C-alpha cells in the first residue's frame, strides 16, 4: 500500500485496526512510535547496485490501556513526517514486535489494515545460476513413460 492510499483510508476513522498474519489483532491501545524513511542500498547477487526506499511505521504496545489512536491524529503525524523527512508516495512497511520484530507489507480490506508477511527473493535469477523450472504436459506421459534422473521430468 502506498503512503497516499494509507493517508486517504484514515479519513474519518475513529479506530484503527491492524490484523496480524495469524488473524489476531494488534491491541487497540497501540502507539505509532515512529514514522520513518528507510533506505536500503545494496548489491544483489548478480552484481547490480540497487536502492529501495519505503515508509516505515513502527507499532508498539504499552501498558497505556486507555490510549486510542484516531485516524486524524495519525494523518497529522504522517503529514509532519512528510514535511520534515521529505517522504514520497512510497510503499508503507509496518514494523511490529510480537515474539520477534517483524516487518510487514500493508493491505486495506473491509475497514482494517492487514499486516502481510514479507518474503525474500532473488533479484538476479538470470545471473546467479538458479536453473529455470521445466514444465511438462502431464497428459503427454503414457503408462510406459518412465522418469529417469537427469531427464527433467521429475
Image (cartoon, helix red, strand yellow):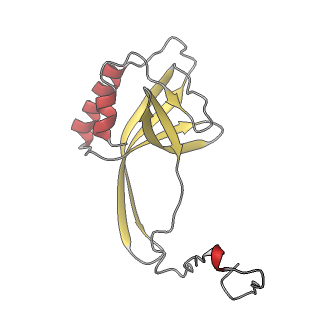
Q: Position of residue 124 (x, y in %)?
A: 45, 74
Q: Quadrant of the N terminus?
A: top left
Please tell me in which quadrant of the rendered image residue 9 appears: top left
> What number of labels is visible?
0
Residue 130 in picture, x, y percent from top left: 56, 78
Task: Say which quadrant the C terminus sits in.
Answer: bottom right
Tell me the residue at 70%/88% (across/down): 150
Query: Farthest residue toward the top?
Result: 66
State left or right for residue 109 relative to residue 131.
left
Depicted 38 relative to depicted 138: above or below: above
The residue at 48%/15% (across/down) is 67
Q: Which residue is drawn at the image coordinates 54% and 79% (left, top)?
A: 132
* Residue at 52% over, 43% down: 116
Can residue 75 be seen by looking at this rendering? Answer: yes
Viewer-proximal residue among 146 and 59? 146
Position of residue 33 in the picture relative to residue 78 (left or right): right
Q: Is residue 10 above or below residue 153?
A: above
Relative to 86, residue 129 above or below: below
Q: Quadrant of residue 140?
A: bottom right
In the rendering, at what x and y percent does residue 15 appear? 43, 18
**Where does the image place residue 144, in percent across and percent down from the top left?**
78, 85
Residue 77 can be seen in this image: no
Amino acid at each position: 500500500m502506498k503512503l497516499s492510499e494509507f493517508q486517504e483510508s484514515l479519513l474519518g476513522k475513529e479506530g484503527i485496526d491492524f490484523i496480524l498474519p495469524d488473524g489476531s489483532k494488534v491491541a487497540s491501545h497501540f502507539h505509532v512510535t515512529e514514522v520513518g524513511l528507510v533506505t536500503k542500498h545494496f548489491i544483489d547477487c548478480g552484481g547490480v547496485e540497487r536502492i529501495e526506499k519505503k515508509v516505515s511505521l513502527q507499532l508498539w504496545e504499552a501498558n497505556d490501556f486507555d490510549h486510542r489512536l484516531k485516524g486524524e491524529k495519525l494523518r497529522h503525524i504522517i503529514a509532519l513526517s512528510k514535511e520534515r523527512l521529505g517522504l514520497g508516495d512510497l510503499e508503507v512497511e509496518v514494523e511490529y514486535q510480537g515474539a520477534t520484530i517483524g516487518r510487514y507489507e500493508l493491505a486495506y480490506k473491509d475497514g482494517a489494515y492487514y499486516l502481510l508477511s514479507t518474503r525474500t527473493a532473488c533479484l538476479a535469477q538470470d545471473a546467479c545460476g538458479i536453473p529455470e523450472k521445466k514444465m511438462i504436459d502431464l497428459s503427454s506421459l503414457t503408462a510406459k513413460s518412465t522418469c529417469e534422473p537427469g531427464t527433467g521430468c521429475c
